[in-house]
Amino acid sequence: MSPVLHENLNEREKLILRSIVQQFILTAAPVGSRNITRKFDVGVSPATVRNIMSELEDSGFINHPHTSAGRIPTDKGYRYYVDSLMEISALNSTEKSIIEKGLDSKLLEKEQILKVASKLLSNITKQIACVTYPTLDKGILTKIQLVSLSSTRMLVVVSIQSGLIKTITLEFESEIEESSIPEVESILNERLSGLTFQEIRQTAKERLINIEDVEKPIMRLFVDSVDKIFTDVKPEEKILITGATNIIQQPEFEDPEKFQSVIELIEDKDIIIHILDKKKPEKSDNILISIGTENEDEKLHEYSLITKEYSFGETSGTVGIIGPKRMEYSKVVAIISYLGDMLTEVLTGNK
């Protein structure tokens, strides 16, 4: 989970910080010393708890809202909690069954699986769920099909080893000879199959030289369009976002201004895609947690992101949730971890 180095806390400080975080997650209300001694077995008096809370505040792990005598965790406090104090919850059999049945590959097409995964994640976590489609740069081309749509329009169907298909329509300035299409298609498959999208973009011109004159009009347009054909999907088509109604029901977003900020965030998919693409876990089985101001964009400073990569053949995508910093991290991490692993199994045909 990408742990960060912190100054050391003693056992009492850890216990009090854990208690504050857990209680604030449950209630969304600032936590006082008496509240801690009543709810948690801390083994010390409220006066001692107040002293420890004072030290934690001085160190920046909690802060003191003006309108309350209680304390709430800071981004630093949450970070220490998820790195050093949190115990990952175990999913119960019902939650596992919901995920497994929902992602049944015998009932769903691959495109549907990702949409279902996003809905499952938002329904179970009660947060905003994000699922990005696999990146295509490492996708390996298995087949190109050229389909004539009219005398000046041609559909290019690109099949990728993992099972994904991308289509794009090419427009010609003059009429094309339909009889030349099969031969062009054969040459393209012979010279480009087995290469990644990235390799095709970089080397297509060299690989497609010395083409006979009769094939040149189609081939020339194909070569000129390589960057467009063998590139990733558009940003707005790259991500599925579900569960907006979940987050606006959280106490943090009762304020109309904050409610509006949620709507703006969801509408600006580029921000979410950018942060998901940039914050990649070091290993595919890792969970990455990004809290508040750790997110570069100011629109995300009130939120935490929890993400995990899933694999789809030679390509990969990301599953994740966006929610208030006051979220049940231990539970959400367990859900994302399990769903991400299931998604990989289903998409790669191992389930």
Image: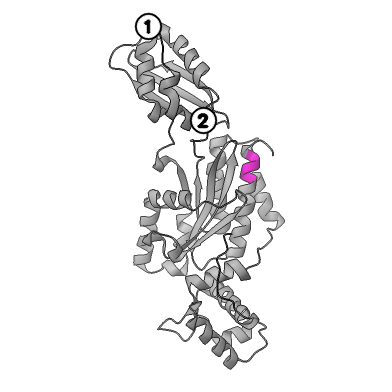
CA gap between label 2 and label 1 equals: 28 Å
> At which x and y percent is residue 64?
45, 82
Please state which of residues 230 and 95 is positioned toward the viewer in this rendering.
230
Determine the residue positioned at 40% across, 53% down. Answer: 266
- Asked whether, in this view, residue 96 is left or right of residue 328, the answer is right
> At which x and y percent is residue 96?
68, 52
Q: How is the image coloured?
A: one colour
| Residue type, mark 2 in image | Thr
The image shows residue 165, relative to residue 92, as above or below, that is above
> At which x and y percent is residue 88?
65, 63
Mark number, residue 196: 2
| Residue type, mark 1 in image | Val
| Image quadrant in which the N terminus is located | bottom right
Q: Quadrant of residue 90?
A: bottom right
- Magenta stretch bounds: 342-346
Please state which of residues 190 and 91 is positioned toward the viewer in this rendering.
190
Q: Element type at marker 1?
A: helix
Task: Decide which of tag 2 and tag 1 comes sooner along the chain.
Answer: 2
The image shows residue 266, relative to residue 101, as above or below, that is below
- Asked whether, in this view, residue 350 is left or right of residue 20, the answer is right
Determine the residue positioned at 41% across, 83% down. Answer: 67
Mark number, residue 324: none
- Asked whether, in this view, residue 216 is left or right of residue 23, the answer is left
Which class describes the residues within 10 Å of circle 2: few (<14), some (14-19), or many (20+)? many
